[in-house]
Amino acid sequence: MSGHSKWATIRHKKGAQDAKRGKIFTKLIKEITVSAKLGGGEIESNPRLRTAILKAKTENMPKDNIDRAIKKGTGELEGVEYVELTYEAYGPGGVAILIDAMTDNKNRTAADVRSMLTKNGGNLGETGCVSYLFQRKGIITFDASQYSEDEIFEAALESGAEDVSTQGDEFEVMTAPEDFADVLETMQKQGFTENSSEITRVPDALTALDNEKTAKALRLIERLDDMDDVQYVSTNLDIPDDFDPEEYL
């Protein structure tokens, strides 16, 4: 299971554009709020909240925003009640797509997701139809021009990571979800600055399509990812190294 979909890399680079529209902060606030609601507002006893706050800090979210989101989750401040949902779907060419959402209106979100899939060559699947193809993993990436492979490999494995691989111009550190925060914090303390970090779903195998279907699948995935209620989109689409994502963005 070396490496994962290049969509994660494209998504991270696209994130800089999304940030000015407030999408990243909105999604992080939802995650912090739900994490605090489910596990309490103390990061020492709530690993999910700790991970969400680490991600928020990576995106330079102000501390006041983080604190308000926690208080909304614990009930200290009035807030919206969010429900977590996962939709399983197929995209153009039969690629597997998992859509993680948080919403205050399940009917609206279900209708919106179904409509987006239908309009872009995909279709909603039954529960369990594609989720078995993925595993939850922590993924941390580092710029290969800033660090040597030996540096990253040694630091990552000493910090408790499962694997290190090279993905294009980045080193990818993979962890078990429960070890993600410890590995990330340990490497940060050692002076390593990550390009991206998140807990995501990693496919066991990738599905390759021709360039035309790859472009169609990526357009669908990007449009799903841009939806307000969608937190994260995972796919097993294999994006060729010579494929230019700018052609579909």
Image (cartoon, rainbow, N blue to C red):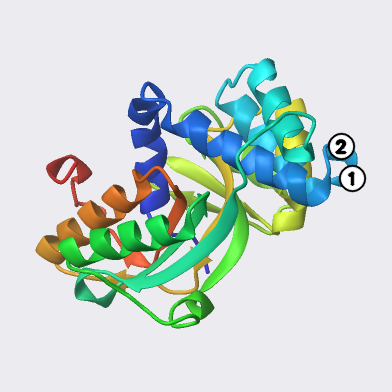
Q: Position of residue 23 (x, y in %)?
A: 42, 32
The answer to whether residue 135 is above or below residue 52 is below
Residue found at x 83% / y 38%: 43
Q: Amino acid at mark 2?
A: Glu
Q: Residues within 10 Å of mark 1 (few under 14, many from 20)?
A: few
Q: Position of residue 232 (x, y in %)?
A: 47, 51
Q: Residues within 10 Å of mark 2 (few under 14, many from 20)?
A: few
Q: Which residue is mark 1?
A: 45
The answer to whether residue 216 is above or below residue 148 is below
**In this rendering, would 144 be left or right of 136?**
left
> Mark 1 and 2 residues: CB-CB less than 8 Å, in contact?
yes
Q: Position of residue 131 (x, y in %)?
A: 50, 75
Q: Which residue is mark 2?
A: 42
User: Tag 2's secondary structure?
Assistant: loop
Q: Position of residue 34 (x, y in %)?
A: 67, 46
* Residue at the outermost right position: 45
**In this rendering, would 119 be left or right of 49?**
left
Q: How many marks?
A: 2
